[in-house]
Image: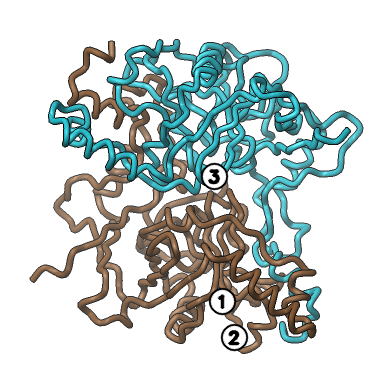
Chain colours: A brown, B cyan
């Protein structure tokens, strides 16, 4: 049967064998469907696999965003590592050892806040974890009657910490899979809007053990040197060569991103298209008419601003 | 505060900054908590990032499993590629072009079957997509009153196809994120039990376009040669160097895996531990007491059989 297909159909067949489900923006409606990302909220992270663009969300976690902007402006992360990358869980970056964090101030816990009246768009169906789920400014949020919080979907930017909720300072994490059990327990303050595949492709690696850490900071100089060399080699594929705020770059060198407006008709239409695939011939089971909020990241796109 | 911590605490702090949530097997209870994986159901896939172990599930999809065993025994996949790897969606492998599939027989659609009375363990809480969710022999399944189907969680093995449900033959896909909207629409016939990180780390790549395909199979010899070289270079990091059935290897060379028995008390305890983290001091929000079935792959472990 397939041998009778023309070449045109061949290529198509390869593309349709598992229908694409990633967000493709529908044609623009009357209202503006995209909003520009403020360069003051755009972090560009260079890792060996590529460039990762992260949008910060100061309205949700102002202290965390201010802290990250400050650390990035100081070059804090340049040469640091994603030193903990656990498959199916999270990628965590920053300074692994508390002995190197004594100068870094901690930030208050900002995992949730009072529900705001405007700017929230309901998902449109139930969520497994939150009484209500939806979006605010492109970020997935959960809420109950009084509180609202950002969700630990793949690609969100969270602050790691010790037991004390206000002990976070600089080590951030990015979930590689939905980690909804972390909701309301860790402060989320941004999300990856481009290049999440570069995080997913990082080598998996465990933090230093207690013994390795002791050797690294030990008084036996040669052993400490050896551990330093070993660690640098172990984390070769996980280095952050640079982390920059887009606003700090010359205007001509800034990449410009837009994020789909989650109050727009286009976003509503995109969600609907992911709830019911029955218009696609390959789909034969009755549509479930449900959308898992972590399965549809809000689309972002790079805008070419270099054109005159 | 952190500067006062001893080295022992330092290493601990690094490990606890985002609590681990991956499955760790609790201590064995009285009943056997693990079952051996039949070498007749164990596929070993070599890709540039490492070895991937896949358990087949013949009870669910006998024709698909028989087909894969046969193709693997013929070396069908050796030198083929994961030619379509879409971040956040699926990794798809096999022969990209239908012109190369004319000799491969198709298999009947086996996405669902009549509910079996024995061997099903309920998840223990609601599922967003299926009326009921749970596990059978280590595989995540959904069911309604009459039918049961395997779920498109990360790491499951599905068969790609064209619009005709019975058009699948040899191109398989592995979801990189939960893709539950595919449930009941594509036949799932196995799952990755070890090495899913090696799939997650594959370079992302799109299939050949219509124009590229036409050039590859075109009558212009030099252009076809160039396209062949280009494709080989493009997919360098995505090659399947070999796919083998463990049963076909000499007994001494077979890796032996065990999978946690999903009818065991250990599995029930593990699920409970993922619904309520309130015993862990870092968790301050009230537990939601829900588990997303795709967030907890059933644990598998490599057993050292080389010991006398």
x and y percentages locating residue A206 in the rendered image: 66, 60
Give the alpha-carbon distance from disc 1 to disc 3, as whole Å.
29 Å
Q: Residue at x 41, y 61 (%)?
A: A192
Subunit under mark 2: A
Which of label 3 and label 2 is nearer to you? Answer: 3
Is residue A10 found left or right of B104 in the rendered image? left
List the residue tagged with mark 2. Answer: A104
x and y percentages locating residue B100 in the rendered image: 32, 20
Q: Quadrant of the C terminus of chain A?
A: bottom left
List the residue tagged with mark 1. Answer: A170
The circle on residue B198 is 3
Is residue B225 found left or right of B174 in the rendered image? left
The answer to whether the residues at label 1 and label 3 have Cβ atoms under 8 Å apart is no
Relative height, residue B104 to residue A108 (above, below): above
Q: Quadrant of the N terminus of chain A?
A: top left
Tell me the element at label 2: loop
Give the alpha-carbon distance from disc 2 to disc 1, as whole Å.
8 Å
Pick the front one: A135 or A235:
A235
Q: Residue at x 85, y 29 (%)?
A: B32
Asked if residue B287 shows in the view, the reply is yes
Residue ranking furthest to the front: B222
Asked if residue A111 shows in the view, the reply is no
Which of label 1 and label 3 is nearer to you? Answer: 3
* Quadrant in which residue A14 is drawn: top left
Give the alpha-carbon distance from disc 3 to disc 2, as whole Å.
36 Å
């Amino acid at each position: 049967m397939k041998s009778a297909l023309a070449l045109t159909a061949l290529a198509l067949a390869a593309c349709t064998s598992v229908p694409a489900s990633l967000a493709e923006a529908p044609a623009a409606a009357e209202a503006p469907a995209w909003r520009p990302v403020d360069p003051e909220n755009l972090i560009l992270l260079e890792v060996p696999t590529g460039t990762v663009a992260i949008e910060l969300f100061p309205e949700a976690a102002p202290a965390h965003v201010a802290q990250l902007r400050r650390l990035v402006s100081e070059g804090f992360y340049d040469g640091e590592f994603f030193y903990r990358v656990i498959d199916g869980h999270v990628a965590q970056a920053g300074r692994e050892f508390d002995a190197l964090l004594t100068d870094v101030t901690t930030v208050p816990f900002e995992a949730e806040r009072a529900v705001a009246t405007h700017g929230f768009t309901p998902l449109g169906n139930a969520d497994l974890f939150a009484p209500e789920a939806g979006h605010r400014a492109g970020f997935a949020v959960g809420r109950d009657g009084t509180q609202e919080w950002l969700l630990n979907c793949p690609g969100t930017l969270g602050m790691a910490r010790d037991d004390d909720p206000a002990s976070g300072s600089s080590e951030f994490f990015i979930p590689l899979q939905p980690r909804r059990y972390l909701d309301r327990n860790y402060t989320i303050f941004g999300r990856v809007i481009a290049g999440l595949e570069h995080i997913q492709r990082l080598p998996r690696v465990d933090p230093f053990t207690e013994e390795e850490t002791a050797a690294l900071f030990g008084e036996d100089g040669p052993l400490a040197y050896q551990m330093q060399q070993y660690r640098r080699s172990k984390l070769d594929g996980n280095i952050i060569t640079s982390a920059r705020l887009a606003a700090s770059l010359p205007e001509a060198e800034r990449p410009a991103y837009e994020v789909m407006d989650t109050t727009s008709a286009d976003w509503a239409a995109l969600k609907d298209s992911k709830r019911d695939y029955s218009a696609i011939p390959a789909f034969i089971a009755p549509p479930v008419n449900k959308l898992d909020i972590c399965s549809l990241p809000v689309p972002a796109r790079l805008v070419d601003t270099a054109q005159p």
